[in-house]
Image (cartoon, helix red, strand yellow):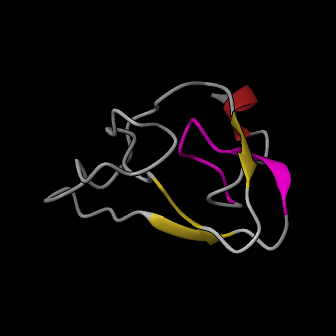
């Protein structure tokens, strides 16, 4: 698998906590979207680490096509 599965054509809004690390699912197969649950094994894709710099709402990419991975850049509107 070289191309990720589209999990959804919208971002995932998440309230992140300062100092906490998150692992964004890059393959689109995780049952715990937008986060990795290990289903990428053997896919050739790996999760992307996101370290929260402050408490805030961020929008994780759901279509897995963002240039600004792991965050949404609006690409879902073009697919």
Q: Residue at x 25, y 54 (%)?
A: 38
Counting from the top left corner in percent of width and height, residue 23 is at: 48, 61
Counting from the top left corner in percent of width and height, residue 62 is at: 58, 36
The kind of secondary structure the magenta stretch mainly shows is loop
Give left or right: position of 33 versus 76: left
Counting from the top left corner in percent of width and height, residue 77 is at: 74, 27
- Compare residues 56 and 5 and report the one nearer the observer: 56
Counting from the top left corner in percent of width and height, residue 18 is at: 77, 68
Instruction: Pick out the residue farthest to the left.
Output: 42
Q: Quadrant of the C terminus?
A: top right
Over which residues does the magenta segment extend? 55-67
58 versus 62 height, above or below: below
15 versus 38 height, above or below: above
64 versus 47 height, above or below: above
Q: Quadrant of residue 47?
A: bottom left
User: Would you say residue 57 sits in the magenta stretch?
Assistant: yes
- Compare residues 34 and 72 and report the one nearer the observer: 34
Q: Residue at x 67, y 27 (%)?
A: 10
Give left or right: position of 30 versus 38: right
């Amino acid at each position: 698998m070289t191309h990720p599965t589209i999990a959804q054509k919208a971002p995932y809004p998440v309230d992140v906590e300062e100092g906490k690390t998150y692992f964004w699912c890059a393959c689109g197969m995780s049952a715990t979207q937008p986060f990795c649950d290990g289903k990428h094994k053997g896919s050739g894709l790996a999760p992307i680490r996101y370290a929260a710099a402050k408490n805030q709402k961020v929008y994780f990419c759901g279509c897995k096509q963002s240039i600004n991975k792991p965050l949404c850049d609006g690409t879902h509107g073009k697919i």
